[in-house]
Amino acid sequence: GYPERLFYPPGTMIVGWLLNWLTLGKLSTALIYESIIFIAYALPAFTFYYALRRLGFERRAAFAAGMFTLGFPTFFDGAHAVVIGMTGSRLSFGLNALVLVWTIDGIETRRSRYVLLAVLTLAFAILFHPYHSIGLILALALYVLVRRWPLGRAFVQIAGIAFGALALDAFWLVPMFAHSSSAMIPHIRATLDQMWRLLTDIALMPYALLALIVVTRVRTEYDAARRAFLIVLLVLPIVLATIMLAWYVLMIEHLYFYQLDPVRLIGEFYFAIILLAALGLSVLSEWLSRFVPPRARTPLATFIVLFVSIVLLIPFVQTSAHFPRPNGEPRFLSQAIRDYRLDELWQG
């Protein structure tokens, strides 16, 4: 009867139902589940590629962004998310790239089809994992401020998209809030130390170094929309990290407000890091290619992006090689048995 279980985000189950319906019930439950896991793993690669290409960035950067999502070394929305069961969060993480660029398109061009696409995609993203919408709205607010749009018009447009998505999700949201109570407070929360380690994980270092290169590109980017997007990506991780740490210290440790675990915002922190790293790698490849004859510059830049993308993918490939085979014992269960001496507990 725990409310969070009764009203768990249903997006993943809806995808399973759609797969069963589209295949006329020919797929087994196990195969449908495995298909959802694969979709969750692969989706961000395509959406991140599309997002950068839609905004007019070069193919090298878009390719790197897609590859980075396949090996990004984090459990929250990274490649390891599907390993620990964060399938819905990973799916929402991938869809947010589409929501962001289609909302920007809708505001920039005022074309209704982009607004409609943003509404539909945001509705699905909320059904997969609603917490991702917080960081997304913050990113859009920063974009509005950087572009210096009239705040009233921008607020109406973004609010229209948000309320449209919420209306589509009312079949789930209304019953959930009607039955919500203090029992909905998460039982498991990250500590301040755990959250700090998520923000400063040494595995993020290669991506962070590549991301810093983007600072040099902001000054030379001639397109106003792309320049604003770059600035938002650079500012967003700083703003999110500040909010997460301040929220924990003030709201949780002092005011004992537990309804929102600030670690839930970490996905959009990683979101910006991945895109910045991809754009930074593209800039780096362009710099290095200047040392060769003009005819060889494009092939060299492409090779550099491909090489670095594959190198950063290797750790996840090595980890996945140790995953249990079908009908085998789950890897994390084996580790838990050793670490906590569960075999002795069970025998006792």
Image (cartoon, rainbow, N blue to C red):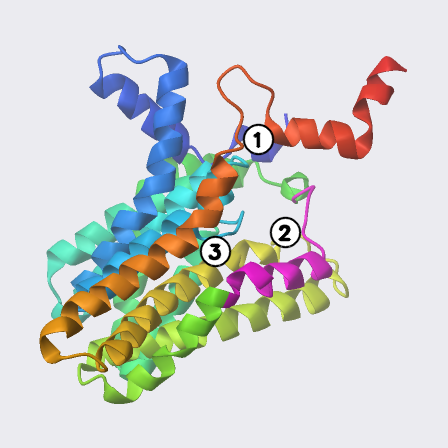
Q: Earlier in the sequence, mark 3 or mark 1?
A: 1
Please give the residue where the numbered disc 1 appears in the rendered image: 5
Q: Nearer the viewer, residue 113 or 328?
A: 328
How far apart marks 3 and 2 lie (CA) works out to 18 Å
Q: Is residue 303 above or below residue 83?
A: below
Badge 2 marks a residue whose secondary structure is loop
State the residue at coordinates (36%, 33%).
38
Q: Nearer the viewer, mark 3 or mark 1?
A: 3
Question: Is residue 188 located in the magenta-colored stretch of the structure?
Answer: yes
In the image, is residue 120 above or below residue 151?
A: above
Looking at the image, is mark 3 or mark 2 nearer the viewer? 3
In the rendered structure, the answer to whether residue 202 lies left or right of residue 290 reads right
Q: Main secondary structure of the magenta part?
A: helix
Residue named by callout 3: 267
The amino acid pointed to by label 1 is Arg
Counting residues from the N terminus, which is met first, the one under dot 3 or under dot 2? 2
Quadrant of res 285: bottom left
- Asked whether the viewer can see residue 212, the reply is yes
Q: Is residue 283 above or below residue 270?
A: below
Pointer 1 local density, CA inside 10 Å: few below 14, some 14–19, many at least 20: few
**What residue type is disc 3 on?**
Gly
Regarding mark 3 in the picture, which secondary structure is present there? Answer: helix
309 vs 181, left or right, is left
Q: Which residues are magenta?
A: 186-205
Numbered badge on residue 259: 2
